Image: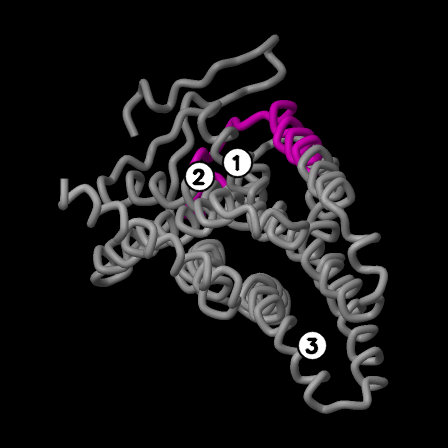
Amino acid sequence: MGSEEKAAIIFNATFVRPAKFYLNGFSNIPHVKYYYVFLCFVYIMTVVGNGLLLSVIYLFKTLHTPKYMIVFNLAFTDLCGSTALIPKVLDTFLFDRRGIVYEACLSYMFFVLFFTSMQSWTLVTMAYDRFIAICFPLRYHSIVTKPAIAAMLLFSWIFLLSAMAFMVGLIDRLSFCESVVIKSFFCDHAPVYRLACNDISLNYMVAFSLFIIILCIPPVLIALTYVFISIALSRIASAGERLKAMKTCTSHLFLVAIFFFPFVGTNIAGLVSYIHPNARIINSTLTQTIPALLNPIIYSLKTEEVLNSIRKLCKRNRLSNTTLSKR
């Protein structure tokens, strides 16, 4: 680092902010450029898949239902979350631009963590939809309405925006008078605030509280809904009806598994044993990128309504192309 890069901005001789942070992820990994190419491919497919799903839901009025409002929200947050993370990771490490301005680092942190949080709570909203559909089928259309789902999603957006803004804003009260090297692949919250040389207890308490709210409470709530769903299904006499009801849940359960298990597994493994920093970083990047890639594939291939809408869209395009060629 040059003397200019080490320069810090000092406020009232109390708060010391670095001009830049330096990201130290993906160090000493052989053939790491192949991994960056893989991430680039994941991002392109994520944009294509989620863009297609968003377009299909928007274009077909038959999909303008409470259930697909939730799917639309998930696809949108997946798209935004991947866009917030992957291009910057590639720019940082593939082109070796590891320095990031202090303010840009905090913005980067905010958007990545916010969209990850929204993905988590959107999966809870999906579980609520499945719970009402199976446990209270006769009242489903009176309970799960467009205004009700819109209110739930809007509350999640407002609450999580406020919570993330508060958590990231607390970093402004810290002084960074020693190391400015972040041992992560993006401006992650814990690796940043732990670099501070003044009291970080408030940052830790807020981070721990939000960790519980975002990554612990959602899977517990989802598990509870499936306990009630299992009880409701056990009371259905026909095995065919039980199978049909369970099929509506398999896509959601798969999304929940690929989103929560790696997050929870990495954190538990980190508590009980040592994980090599590179292994943790690769696992974390996959955890934050692969679910966004798989979500539209699962909903496109497992949901008959979406498949039919895509077929109609392709048929409509073929007809319009044929009409244009005849002219």
Mark carried by residue 157: none
Residue at (61% x, 31% y) in the render: 168
Q: Give the image quarter of residue 32.
A: bottom left
Task: Indicate whether residue 147 is drawn in magenta.
Answer: no
Q: Residues within 10 Å of mark 3 (few under 14, many from 20)?
A: some
- Left or right, 37 with respect to 123, comes to left
Q: Secondary structure at mark 1?
A: helix
x and y percentages locating residue 270 in the rendered image? 58, 64
Q: Is residue 172 above or below residue 206?
A: above
**In the drawing, what numbered circle is on residue 111?**
1
Q: Residue at x 76, y 65 (%)?
A: 133
Mark 2 or mark 3, whichever is nearer to me: 3
User: In percent of the image, x 24 and y 55: which residue is there?
Assistant: 37
Q: Is residue 238 above or below residue 62?
A: below
In magenta stretch: residue 163: yes
- Between the C-alphas of marks 3 and 1, the distance is 36 Å
Q: In which quadrant of the rendered image does the N terminus lie?
A: top left
Q: Is residue 116 above or below residue 19?
A: below
At label 3, which amino acid type do we have?
Answer: Ala
Q: Nearer the viewer, mark 3 or mark 1?
A: 3
Q: Quote the CA–CA distance across marks 2 and 3.
A: 36 Å
Q: Earlier in the sequence, mark 1 or mark 2?
A: 2
Residue 53 locus on image (x, y percent): 45, 52
